[in-house]
């Protein structure tokens, strides 16, 4: 299992939202085909075919747990994760 497979499993499990690194969440969104626009410490991700935008900010070097949950819900809603959305 690759590093990114493990990352997606962490995001999709819902049990490790407090332990996801901010840079890891950014990498996951990039791998899912999102484009980023940066305004200050706000990283705004968008993608064709996805109505919602994802606005994330770092909490130190970790992602904020509620933002990890938002990303997980968008992955599930739009079935973006391939075999990771189970």
Image (cartoon, rainbow, N blue to C red):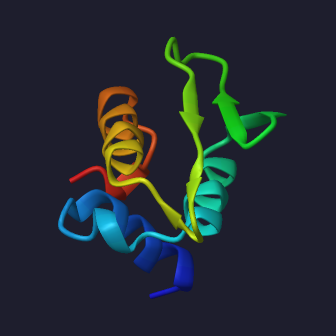
In the rendered image, which quarter is residue 36 located in? top right
> Given the current orientation, which residue lies at the most extreme top position?
51
Which residue is at the front of the view, 1 or 58? 58
Q: How far across and how far down the image is residue 81, in percent?
A: 43, 49
Q: Residue at x 59, y 71 (%)?
A: 61
Q: How far across and how far down the image is residue 3, in percent?
A: 54, 84
Position of the N terminus by quadrant: bottom left
Q: Residue at x 41, y 50 (%)?
A: 82
The tally of labels here is 0
> Given the current orientation, which residue lies at the most extreme bottom position?
1
Q: How far across and how far down the image is residue 6, in percent?
A: 42, 79
Indicate whether 51 appears above or below 61: above
Q: Residue at x 54, y 74 (%)?
A: 4
Indicate whether 35 appears above or below 25: above
Q: Residue at x 29, y 58 (%)?
A: 12
Indicate whether 23 appears above or below 71: below
In the rendered image, which quarter is residue 37 located in? top right
Indicate whether 78 appears above or below 21: above
Q: How far across and how far down the image is residue 72, in percent?
A: 34, 45
């Amino acid at each position: 299992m690759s590093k990114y497979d493990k990352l997606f499993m962490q995001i999709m499990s819902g049990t490790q939202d407090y332990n996801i690194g901010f840079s890891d969440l950014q990498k996951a969104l990039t791998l899912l085909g999102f484009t980023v626009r940066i305004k200050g410490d706000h990283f705004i991700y968008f993608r064709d075919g996805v109505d919602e935008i994802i606005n994330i900010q770092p909490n130190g070097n970790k992602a904020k747990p509620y933002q990890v949950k938002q990303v997980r819900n968008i992955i599930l809603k739009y079935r973006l994760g391939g075999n990771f959305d189970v």
